[in-house]
Amino acid sequence: MAKQNPIFTTIGKKTNEIPVEISYKILELFSGGLYSSPTKAIEELVANSFDAFASWVHVLISQDIDSENAIIAVVDDGDSMDIDGLKALWKIGESAKADEQKIDKNKRLPIGKFGIGKLATWVLSRELTHICKQKNKYLAVTMFYSNLDNNKTAENSKLNLDVRNLSKDEAKEALKTLATMNFDLNILFNNNVDSWTVSILSNLKPMVKDLKPGRLEWVLSTAMPLTPDFKSYLNNKEIKPIKLDTKPINKLIIGKNDKVADNLGFISDKNDMLPDEEKFGVTLPTLGRITGFV
């Protein structure tokens, strides 16, 4: 009896196609070389979430990674994709990450590999599904890498990926598998998150057996930038950047013994009624009172 495809790879109504052209040799060279460990492959997916201006990302790994239905999922609330975005995603070797307008607006520089990050998934799985919410619309696309694996001798493989439209109920049905991993689906469907992307790796390859949660946690804790507007989770446990454990050489508090403010003629003050991080401050003519530390 043939193995049945997971519901998230089939649910929805086909409304479009995405043409994809990939060289199998390039796929092996880039993915097999750059992402020769499973932890590095997942790190790249998390980097993609960061580059999409997400404020959080969840990495979910099935407890029984050897089971036939095991998956790895990466969920984030970053800028998701419409049909044009999904087509751009599968233009191999191209990337929209250097969008100057976005970078200037969000003050966040990209950290992922330009245009090839999605290929990291090939070393871990035979199927990659993206389910996206943007502007109250739900789209799903699945790449069946097995179609490439069956065509190794061709100089280039040309595929058409089906784009499926999903209703909200169908999106919930597709993502029920995340609930079995103790992920709260209400995070995605309570209307507080306008845009999100779920990347699901399924039909996993033998390399996933080398995936060690402790090692992955350490890699993610060291790889992600230290920034207050991005949090990452592994199986619902928040991963704290290891840089937070580094003892600082010095700590400068705005308004406390603030010689710069004094030299510029700005007023420094201390208000013991405020929380510790806001007790000291400096009043600027156009901004008012500011607080903070370096």
Image (cartoon, helix red, strand yellow):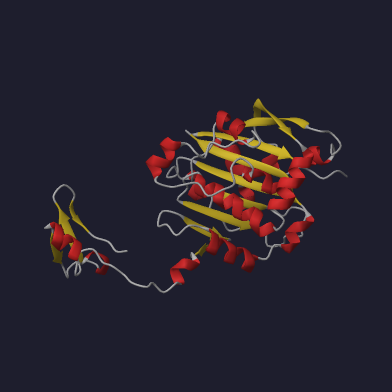
Q: In the image, is residue 152 above or below residue 258?
A: above
Where does the image place residue 165, in percent across and percent down from the top left?
60, 30
Q: Residue at x 29, y 64 (%)?
A: 293
**Numbered-mark total:** 0
Q: Is residue 179 left or right of residue 153?
A: left
Q: Is residue 281 left or right of residue 239?
A: left
* Residue 236 appears anywhere in the view: no
Q: In the image, is residue 242 above or below residue 107?
A: below
- Name the residue nearer the viewer: 121 or 233: 121
Q: Residue at x 76, y 36 (%)?
A: 23
Where does the image place residue 258, in percent across and percent down from the top left?
19, 66
Q: In the image, is residue 83 above or below residue 202?
A: above
Where does the image place residue 19, in percent across and percent down from the top left?
69, 28
Q: Residue at x 74, y 51 (%)?
A: 32
Q: Residue at x 75, y 41 (%)?
A: 26
* Residue 114 appears anywhere in the view: yes
